[in-house]
Amino acid sequence: MATTVIIGAGIIGVSTAYYLSDHQPPSSIHLVEVAPELFSSASGYAGGFLAKDWFSRPAAALGALSYEEHRRLAEANGGREKWGYSSSTSVSYTAAPTEGKETKGRGEDWLQAGTSRAEAAVAVEAEVVDAASGKSPAWLRRVDGDHLERIGEENTTAQVDPLLLCRFFLQECLKRGVRLHHPATVLSVSADILHGELSSVRIADTGTSIETDLPCTRIIVAAGAWSPRVFQSLFHHSKLRLPITSLAGHSLLLKSPRWHSELEANGCHAIYTTHSSGHCPEMYARLGGHLYLAGLNSLTVPLPNIAGGAPVDEKAIEQLKEIAKELLSNRNGNNDLEVVREGLCFRPVTPWGMPIISRIPDSDLGVGMATRPGEDGGVFVAAGHGPWGISMSLGTGLVLAELVQGRPLSADISGLAVRCE
């Protein structure tokens, strides 16, 4: 029996374990997470925005599959109540094109380019949004001269609370019998003497320092921005350098007594805008009355050794608070915003703006290491989703499980294979 060790228990790791457990004994699946607090980076601190058709061609099929999986699982498991799944009206201060149905830009580049995610929206007929239409949320401060437009097609955007979604998947995995090692770190891999094929992974409990050898024929590296470090530490003879870097992003989770009833009545909104500071704030209203505000991103904040290991930048947080006061204060000028949580997460990004979902060829594992052929073994990587980790998570988990287990794939991921340029 092929035993699978998944390194990284974020949204990609737990969703992959969930789908793997549909077709192999759950007890043969091991999740290993080193961070003291689960979901302490992008998986727990992301906006939770879901899109169906905001992706360039190599990821288009995966994005559409993932969107439908989010909808299907929410309907089957009470996702609205358990993790805040809701359809979302997406509007932008920036006008959308009126002709054709091509994307406005490469949405996977918006973070690094400092532009708006709205540039990835599929063009629709221009629809000016006013307060009476129900598509302009009451919590957004409006002034004379504002110009809002709906972006995206109907039924193609939605919203979740990513932390609650991650917790749901982890709980389901544990109920099935998937084994969680937390907090624990992966130390090394070993090959059998006869064939030189991957046979075990050594892990250490970071609290007790007790080391354990897990029999293993398949490894999945799903450690987000830390994936290159994990891969290199295990396969130190390999010349392959996974081209995944980190992009830090600060966020605020806010609430106000004005929002709860309005959200229940009119549903969730995603608002994209620009600001005089040069940033492109994004705001996501969630069921239950919380509003997520982000848009301050940096390539210069160093990646900590483990998730949750870097403090927030107080200047960035104060800037977000000022943006919140400007965009969200009520019409009487009173500031009734309460900061529920300040956040800093590190999104894994690739130079070409696409995730890597791929088996690593044995030739790239280094001298002295191979894997069993076909579905009996292999080393796999699933990381680099950038701003779309939550949106693409369920599709990634499903297709990766199919790839690992040698089953037909539900989406074409041929354009997401590992590459080094």
Image (tube, rainbow, N blue to C red):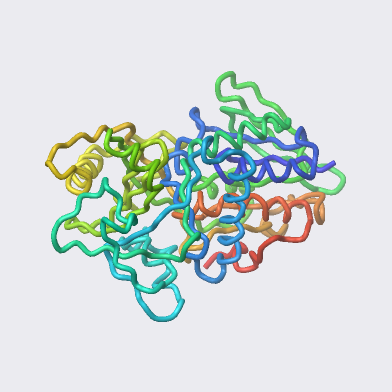
Dividing the picture into quadrants, the one containing residue 399 is: bottom right
At which x and y percent is residue 407?
A: 78, 57
Nearest the eye: 228 or 389: 389
At which x and y percent is residue 104?
A: 39, 73
At which x and y percent is residue 331?
A: 15, 45
Which residue is depicted at the point 64% across and 43% down? 76
Q: Quadrant of the N terminus?
A: top right
Question: How many numbered circles are shown?
Answer: 0
Nearest the eye: 34 or 295: 295
Nearest the eye: 185 or 265: 265
Q: Is residue 86 above or below residue 335?
A: below
- The residue at the far front in this view is 132
- The residue at the far top in this view is 208
Which residue is depicted at the point 64% across and 51% down? 237
On screen, residue 371 versus residue 229, left or right, reads right
Which residue is depicted at the point 25% across and 49% down? 140
- The residue at the far right in this view is 194
Nearest the eye: 182 or 343: 343
At which x and y percent is residue 85?
A: 50, 44
On screen, residue 131 versus residue 21, left or right, reads left
